Amino acid sequence: MKTFSKDSQIIIICPPQMVTGGPEALHQLSDQLHKFGLKNVFLHYIPAKKNPKPTNYNIYKSSEIDIIEDKEDTVLIIPESMTDLVKKYPKSQKVIWWLSVDFYKILMDKRIRKQNVFSKILYKQKEKEYFFEDLPNVYQWAQSFRSKKYLLDHHVPAEKIDFVCDYINPIFLEEGEIISKNPANKKIIYNPRKGQKEIAALIESSPELDWIPIQNMNAEQIKKIMSESLVYVDFGENPGRDKMLRESVSQDCCIISGKNGSSLYYEDLMIPEEYKFQFSQKEIPHILAKIKEVLDDYSAHIKNFQIYKDVVKTEKEQFENKLKEIFV
C-alpha cells in the first residue's frame, strides 16, 4: 500500500445491522485502528440505515461517516461482497478484504440480475465490476488460506496479497479460565443456519442422540453452552475461517466437520483428518460412529484439538501485529 499521512481517512465499508462473522471482523478492524491512535478511521455502512451498528458490536470502538471523498490518500477497506465499489472510487487506495470467497461472485451476479431491461442495456459490466484486474491502487487481504489460494488462482500477484485474519469475540479469550467438562453431558451442539440438510439427515438417523441448536443466544450464552458441551458439529459451506468453529475449540469442544470451503484445508481448520467427512448418505453411519466415539471417550479425543486451540488463542495478537505492520 502507498504511504498515507496522519490526515488520511481510512474508511471501512460495512453492511448495516448484520451480526455475522464478516461485519464483526470489520468492526474489529475499526476498533484496533482506533487503539493505535489513528484519528480518521470511519465505518461507512451500505446501504444507509438508521442505527446501523448492531448492539453486539458496542464492544468495538467506531465512528461513522456518510460521504466518501475519492482522494489519493483515502484508504477504503472493502469486503469482497462489495467489489463494485472498487471502480466507483478510482483515486482512492483500496483494500479488498476476502472474508468470504463465495460471496464475491454471488453478489456480483445478484447486482447484475437486479438491473431492469433498460439499465441492463446501459450497464457496462467491465467498467462497473472488479474482475481481478491488476490495478495500481488495489490491494488484497486474505482472511483464510483458501481465500489466498483463490486470489493466486485468479492471477493476483503474491506481493499484493497480505494475510489478515480476524479473531473470535474477546469473551472467548479470557485468560485464566478453567474449562471443566462433565463427560455425562453428551449433548451435541450445532449452528442450525449452517449445513441444514446435512444436519437434518444426521439428526433423523440418530434419535438416540441429544442435538442442541445454537440459536437466539448472545455471546455469553454461546460460550456457556460450548463450555458445557463435548462435541460441535459443522457441515456448513464455510466460505472463510468460520467464527463458531474457532469459538467451539476455544471452549474445548471436539469438532466433527465437513470438507466444504475453508474446512477442507488444514491451514484453516487445523484438526486431524479423521474428524472431517465428505458428506453423503453413505457416510452418515461413519459420521455418527465418530460422534459416538468422541462422546464415549472425550478425554482421549480432545487432545487432538490442542493445536487448533493454540492457533485460535493467538489470532488476536497476530491480527494486531499485522495491522501495526501495515498502518503504524
Image (cartoon, grey):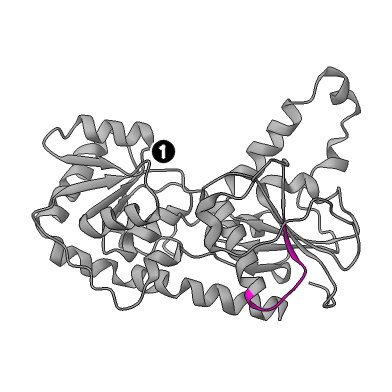
| Residue bearing mark 1 | 193
Q: Quadrant of the C terminus?
A: bottom right
Report the front residue among 222 and 233.
222
The answer to whether residue 229 is visible is: yes
Q: Which residue is drawn at 32% across and 62% down?
A: 249
Callout 1: few (<14), some (14-19), or many (20+) C-alpha neighbours within 10 Å?
few
Q: Position of residue 233 (x, y in %)?
A: 30, 48
Residue 37 magenta: yes
Tell whether position 73 is magenta.
no
Could you tell me residue 5's position as x and y percent? 85, 77
Please indicate whether residue 56 sits to the left or right of residue 195 in the image.
Answer: right
* Residue appearing at x 26%, y 53% in the figure: 225
Compare residues 177 and 194 and report the one nearer the observer.
Answer: 177
Rendered image quadrant of residue 195: top left
In the figure, is residue 16 to the left or right of 47? Answer: left
For the record, the magenta segment spans 35-43
Task: Please determine whether, in this image, residue 233 is positioned above or below residue 230.
Answer: above
- The kind of residue tagged 1 is Arg
Residue 245: horizontal and vertical position, in percent?
38, 56
The residue at the far top in this view is: 117
The count of marks equals 1
From the viewer's perspective, is 102 left or right of 109? left
Q: Nearer the viewer, residue 328 or 219?
A: 219
User: Where's residue 244, x and y in %?
Assistant: 40, 54
Relative height, residue 56 to residue 1 (above, below): above
State the SS at label 1.
Answer: loop
